[in-house]
């Protein structure tokens, strides 16, 4: 009998923690799955409650998408960006960023995040490679409670990177997180492109 009660409680707990997936989320997840030819990836792609609301604001108000690598920037669909009047930038190789990082004895990724956050307007910050960028975002949010940012987080790695993604998921930052060890620039750019495609589809409705 005790075993049955425990089993029942475990089942209820699993039901209560199950992710709520809207039709919009499902469409984005399907696009990512098709693009990466990976049907399993949708199991670890999670959306915070306000993430898509902030994404829509970024798209509608000509916001900026900031990436952590030039590789990821090159994979974002320029035609879709143009249709939405959204810009996409990467600052990690900017000479000014390099100089400041050297002076501070810190990472380019972290300095690039500081630079991006200082820019006016709504921003989507997409991270596919640099855990330092994600760590800096979390540090800044802990002090400032960032309100004009949504984060796409899909860096790949083991324990430390997984923990950073979990810290983001547990924070109040609007975010779309590829939880667990999987990820990388291609996964992150695929998520961004899926968000762009859904925003264009919404405009046509």
Image (cartoon, rainbow, N blue to C red):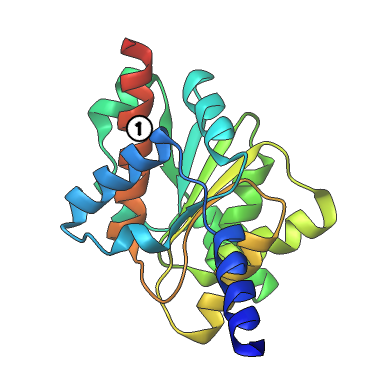
Front-most of 20 and 120? Answer: 20
* Residue in the picture at 51% in, 34% down: 55
Q: Residue 4 sits in which quadrant?
A: bottom right
Say which quarter of the image contains residue 76: top left
Residue 100, can we see it?
no
Residue under the image location 31 percent in, 40 percent down? 193
The quadrant of the picture occupied by the N terminus is bottom right
With 114 as the anchor, is 99 left or right in this view?
Answer: left
The residue located at (47%, 25%) in the rendering is 59
Query: Could you say where residue 15 lies in the image, as x and y percent from the top left?
Result: 55, 60
Does residue 25 lie above or below 70 as drawn?
A: above
Q: Is residue 60 visible?
A: yes
Seen at 65% across and 31% down, the residue is: 120
Q: In the displayed orientation, state which residue is furthest to the front.
A: 1
Q: Is residue 185 above or below residue 152?
A: below
Could you tell whether 125 is left or right of 25 in the image?
right
Residue 34 coordinates in the image, percent (x, y): 18, 49
User: Of all residues shown, which one is farthest toward the top?
Assistant: 205
Q: Would you call the spot at circle 1 few (<14 residues within 10 Å), some (14-19), or many (20 or more)?
A: many
> Left of 111 or right of it: where is 153?
left
Image quarter for residue 128?
Answer: bottom left
Would you name the residue on which mark 1 appears? 196
SS label for mark 1: helix
In depth, the one of 36 and 17 nearer the eye is: 17
x then y, percent, for residue 38: 20, 61
Seen from the viewer's position, the closer of residues 148 and 67 is 148
Q: Position of residue 51 (x, y in %)?
A: 57, 41
Q: Which quarter of the rendering shows the C terminus?
A: top left
């Amino acid at each position: 009998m005790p075993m049955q009660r425990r089993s029942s409680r475990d089942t209820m707990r699993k039901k209560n923690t199950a992710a709520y997936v809207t039709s919009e989320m499902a469409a984005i997840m399907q696009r990512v799955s098709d693009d990466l030819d990976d049907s399993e990836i949708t199991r670890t792609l999670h959306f915070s409650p306000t993430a898509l609301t902030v994404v829509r604001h970024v798209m509608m108000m000509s916001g900026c998408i900031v990436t952590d690598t030039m590789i990821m920037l090159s994979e974002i669909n320029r035609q879709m960006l143009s249709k939405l009047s959204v810009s996409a930038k990467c600052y990690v190789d900017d000479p000014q960023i390099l100089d400041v990082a050297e002076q501070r004895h810190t990472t380019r990724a972290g300095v690039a995040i500081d630079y991006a956050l200082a820019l006016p307007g709504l921003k989507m910050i997409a991270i596919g490679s640099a855990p330092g960028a994600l760590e800096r975002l979390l540090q800044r949010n802990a002090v400032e409670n960032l309100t004009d940012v949504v984060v796409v987080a899909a860096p790949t790695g083991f324990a430390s990177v997984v923990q950073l993604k979990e810290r983001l998921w547990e924070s109040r930052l609007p975010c779309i997180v590829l939880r667990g060890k999987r990820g990388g620039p291609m996964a992150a750019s695929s998520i961004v492109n899926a968000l762009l495609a859904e925003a264009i589809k919404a405009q046509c409705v």
